[in-house]
Amino acid sequence: MTDPLDPMSSDSPEAQTPFETVESAPASAPSGTPLKSPPVITMHAPSAETLWMEIVIAINYLTRLNLRLKESPRPRFIRKAMVWFPLVGAIIGFFGASVDWIMTQIGLPGIITSAFAVISMLWITRALHEEEFASMANQYGRTFDKEQGVGWLKEERSVQYGTLAVILVIIMKIGAIASLSDNDVVFQALITSACWSRAMMVVMASWLRPIPADPVADYFQQPPALRMLLALAVGGLIAFAVLGSYATYALAFGTGAGLLVTLLGANHLRGYNGPLMGTLQEIVEITILGVILALQ
C-alpha cells in the first residue's frame, strides 16, 4: 500500500522525477534540436535617412552650412552624430588645402597662400574652435591674475588672453603650412590634422561627463563607446589613406596631445565643455602639423 503524500511513492506524480524537471521542447522544434537563447546584443544597420540625419547634424555644428532636416533630431541621434566628426574635419582640411592650391596656381608666395588657407578654414568653421580656445585662455588668464593678486598696473586689461592665444595659433598654422614642401604635402597635412583633431573631440566627449549649463555639452552629452571607436576608425582610415605610413607618427603625437588636454578637463573642470573641446581641437591640429613638418 502506498502513501499518496509520500513523494517517493510510485503513485505520486513527483515519484517519476524526484531529482530533475524535464521541460518539453516546443512543438515547432524538431526532436533532438538544442534550444538557442536569444542574442545578448542585437545590432541593426541604420537606415539611409538616419545616416543622413547624423551627417547633417555633424556638418551643421562643425561648419557654417545650415542643411535642413524634416524634423528636429532626437538626442540619441545627436550623440551618435559625433561619429562623423572626422569625416567632416577631413572635408574642412580639403577645403583649406584647395584654397592654398588655387592661390599657388595664381603665383602667390607661400606665406600668402597659407594665410588664405587658414582664413578659408576659419570662414567655413565660423572660427568655432578658435573662439572656444580663446574662452579657455581667458578663463585661465583671469585665474592667473587673481593668484598674482594684482592686474596689469592695477587696471582693467584691454587685450584679453584669448585674443593673444588665437593670434599665436593662427601665426603657427600659417608658418607651418608655408613651410611645407609642396601642395601635395599641404593636402596631406591639412586633411590629416583636421580629421584626427575632430576624432579626438569624440574621445573627450565619450570619456568625460558633460558640464551642466554648457550649450555644447548639453547638446551632445556623451556619445556611446561604440560610436567613439567608430569615429577613431574613420579618422584612422582617412589618415592612413592620405598620409601613408607616416600617419602612425602623426596620429601617435596627436593622440598624446589630445589625451593631455582631456586630462586637464578631468582634473580641473571635472568634465568637458565647449571651450575645452575647442582647445583640444586646436592643440591636436597644431601638433600634427608640426609632426608632418618635421617628417617631410
Image (cartoon, grey):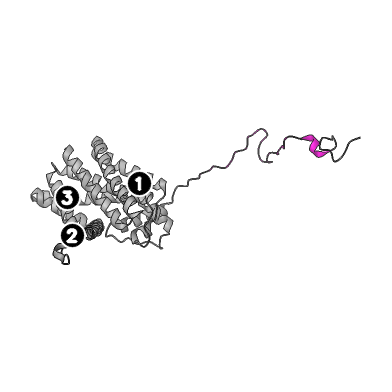
Q: CA distance from mark 3 to mark 1?
A: 25 Å
- The residue singled out by tag 3 in the image is 173
Quadrant in the picture for residue 152: bottom left
Answer with mark 1 or mark 2, whichever residue precedes in sequence.
2
Residue 102 in view: no
Count residues near mark 3 (Cα–Cα under 10 Å), then give few for <14, some for 14-19, many for 20+.
many
Answer with mark 3 or mark 1, whichever residue precedes in sequence.
3
- The residue singled out by tag 2 in the image is 163
- The residue singled out by tag 1 in the image is 231
Find residue 52 and report its horizontal and vertical position in percent. 37, 54
Q: Nearer the viewer, residue 59 or 7?
A: 7
Q: Is residue 182 left or right of residue 15?
A: left
Q: Nearer the viewer, residue 134 or 220?
A: 134
Three-letter amino acid code of the residue under disc 2: Thr
Three-letter amino acid code of the residue under disc 1: Ala
Give the magenta-colored segment's residue range.
12-41
Quadrant in the picture for residue 229: top left
Q: Is residue 28 left or right of residue 189?
A: right
Find residue 281 and report its horizontal and vertical position in percent. 26, 51
Is residue 15 found inside the magenta-colored segment of the image? Answer: yes
Q: Residue at x 24, y 46 (%)?
A: 193
Find residue 130 and report its horizontal and vertical position in percent. 23, 56
Answer with mark 2 or mark 3, whichever residue precedes in sequence.
2
**Helix, strand or loop at disc 1?**
helix
Residue furthest to the bottom in view is 156
